């Protein structure tokens, strides 16, 4: 077993058979196809490469009576994410229990409010990932996600919550409910039907770009390798087809087993479908447990390199669906600086957890007054939001941003680079090595294409 697997065992006290990530020998890379020569990208309708950087909205919706984001309703609510923090995307949580509170009865009032918020985000200049979110299966286990009817009341009744919430995934009652979701055609089909209805209602909403099939899927009692190679791909194919029946052009995002959160390579085999996105999470265990962070940039690059390698082997674009740290944990801001440097170096999209408003012991990017929090300030940085060609490299050292790209005729329209006010409070000086045009409109640098390899520098004043 690899060191990361031992780390996961130590963290999750689940070293027995179901974790068995290395059963059969080797690791995730040894029997995979050689990676393609170039990374795959999410592209817009005119061929531009989109690097999605944003946040999750929002944790409070898990417990809200209407299951909706409390701080994000109108365009003006979303604009600070763009103007102040430099984001171009949000991962919007929705819940099966809210979509289908009773078997076969869908709540279209809820979905209309979800669509309203998607369109408000789109009007603010944000792309939206619609994430069907779950934690520890669902409400029956005191968490969020699946409606109670999706599993057995007797299992809910016998469940005893462990001291740390995420250990609930390894309780036999929760494992049984996941086994039914993956393997029972009736339950799996109900989830597919719910997704089909969601897509039917949301299709065409301005800003909607990606549907995410399930947050942090658990493998139940299966081995991780078996789950990712045999069980999840079949279920994912069924759910993708249900979405595509109503929204054939949208991207669909797939999470690997949540074992990958701590740096394990994934065995996930994508189903044979188009326009898929790979969506792992990055959470160092010491931060999640509140112990603190003392790692180096090299430690973080090991985590993100695994993410990048996994996506390259599959030929899929990648967005890290969640990463983050609580503001009361030692080393949290150091980690955020390191991980966003690593995302830049590896050319990865990411949506941070989370976009709420809170102070003290929080992941939130805004404080209770609505001003950027220490977390928000740590992740506010420029990035190539849209590239007319291929992004080659970019970096930001806190005052100077550099971006190299190649305009190869694969895209039309302008290159867009975010210019967050938090990172450039006194403004910025912008220069193109080739002397081309660059203008600033709001929180965006706009660069018309001229072809060839290009280099942009932005310096804080």
Image (tube, helix red, strand yellow):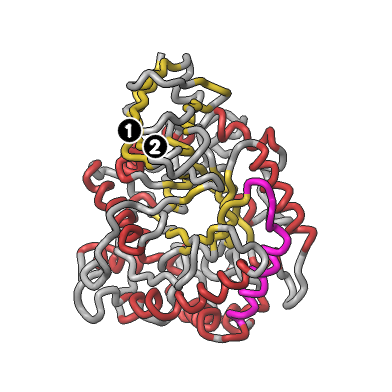
Q: Position of residue 293 (x, y in %)?
A: 30, 44
* Closer-to-camera residue (45/283): 45
Q: Mark 1 and 2 residues: CB-CB less than 8 Å, in contact? A: yes
One can see residue 334 in this view: no
- At x 20%, y 67%, the residue is 2
Instruction: Say if 430 sits above or below 53 in the image.
Output: above
Stretch in magenta: 187-207
> For residue 151, which numbered disc appears in the image?
none
Q: Main secondary structure of the magenta part?
A: helix
> Residue 344 falls in which quadrant of the image?
top left
* Residue 163 covered by magenta stretch: no
Horizontal side of 288 relative to 65 (left or right) equals left
Point out the tag, 1 or 2, that comes first from the N-terminus. Answer: 2
One can see residue 279 in this view: yes
Q: Position of residue 175 (x, y in %)?
A: 47, 79
* Closer-to-camera residue (251/77): 251
Instruction: Say if 135 sits above or below 75 in the image.
Output: below
Horizontal side of 80 relative to 342 (left or right) equals right
Instruction: Say if 408 sits above or below 260 in the image.
Output: above
Q: What is the secondary structure assignment of the residue under circle 1?
A: strand
Q: Name the residue under label 1.
A: 453
Q: What is the secondary structure assignment of the residue under circle 2?
A: strand
* Closer-to-camera residue (423/102): 423
Q: Where is residue 347 in the image (x, y as percent from the top left)?
A: 35, 44
Instruction: Say if 351 sits above or below 388 in the image.
Output: below
> For residue 407, which numbered disc appears in the image?
2
- At x 67%, y 66%, the residue is 246
Mark 2 neighbour class, 10 Å CA radius: few under 14, some 14 to 19, many 20 or more: some
- At x 75%, y 52%, the residue is 113
> Residue 106 falls in which quadrant of the image?
bottom right
Q: Position of residue 331 (x, y in %)?
A: 33, 39
């Amino acid at each position: 077993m690899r060191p990361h697997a031992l780390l996961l065992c130590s963290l999750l006290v689940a070293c027995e058979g179901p974790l068995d990530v290395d059963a059969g020998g080797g690791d995730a890379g040894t029997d995979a196809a050689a990676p393609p020569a170039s990374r795959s990208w999410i592209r817009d309708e005119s061929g531009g490469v989109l690097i999605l950087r944003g946040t999750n909205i929002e944790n409070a919706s898990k417990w809200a009576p209407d299951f909706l984001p409390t701080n994000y309703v109108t365009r003006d609510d979303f604009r600070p994410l763009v103007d102040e923090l430099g984001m171009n995307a949000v991962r919007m949580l929705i819940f099966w229990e809210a979509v289908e509170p009773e078997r076969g009865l869908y709540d279209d009032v809820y979905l209309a409010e979800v669509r309203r918020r998607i369109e408000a985000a789109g009007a603010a200049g944000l792309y939206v990932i619609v994430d069907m979110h779950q934690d520890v299966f669902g409400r029956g286990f005191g968490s969020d996600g699946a409606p109670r009817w999706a599993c057995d009341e007797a299992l809910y009744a016998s469940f005893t919550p462990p001291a740390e919430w995420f250990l609930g995934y390894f309780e036999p009652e929760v494992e049984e409910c996941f086994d039914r979701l993956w393997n029972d055609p009736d339950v799996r089909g109900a989830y597919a039907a719910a997704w089909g209805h969601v897509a039917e209602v949301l299709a065409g909403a301005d800003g909607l770009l990606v549907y995410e099939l399930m947050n942090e899927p658990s493998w139940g009692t299966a081995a991780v390798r078996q789950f990712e190679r045999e069980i999840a791909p079949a279920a994912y194919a069924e759910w993708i087809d249900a979405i595509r029946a109503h929204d054939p052009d949208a991207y669909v995002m797939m999470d690997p087993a949540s074992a990958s959160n701590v740096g394990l390579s994934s065995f996930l085999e994508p189903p044979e479908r188009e326009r898929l996105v790979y969506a792992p999470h990055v959470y160092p265990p010491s931060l999640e447990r509140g112990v603190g962070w003392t790692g180096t940039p090299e430690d973080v690059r090991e985590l993100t390199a695994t993410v990048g390698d996994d996506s390259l082997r599959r030929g899929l674009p990648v967005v890290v669906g969640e990463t983050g740290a609580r503001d009361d944990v030692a080393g949290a801001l150091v980690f955020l600086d390191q991980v966003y440097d690593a995302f830049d170096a590896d050319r990865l999209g990411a949506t941070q957890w989370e976009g709420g408003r809170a102070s003290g012991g929080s992941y939130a990017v805004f404080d209770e007054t609505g001003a950027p929090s220490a977390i928000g300030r740590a992740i506010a940085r420029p990035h190539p939001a849209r590239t007319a060609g291929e992004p080659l490299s970019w970096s930001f050292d806190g005052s100077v941003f550099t971006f190299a790209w190649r305009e190869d005729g694969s895209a039309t329209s302008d290159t867009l680079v975010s210019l967050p006010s938090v990172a450039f409070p006194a403004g910025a000086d912008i220069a193109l090595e080739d002397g081309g045009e660059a203008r600033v409109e709001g929180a965006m640098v706009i660069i018309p294409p001229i072809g060839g390899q290009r280099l942009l520098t932005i310096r804080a004043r």
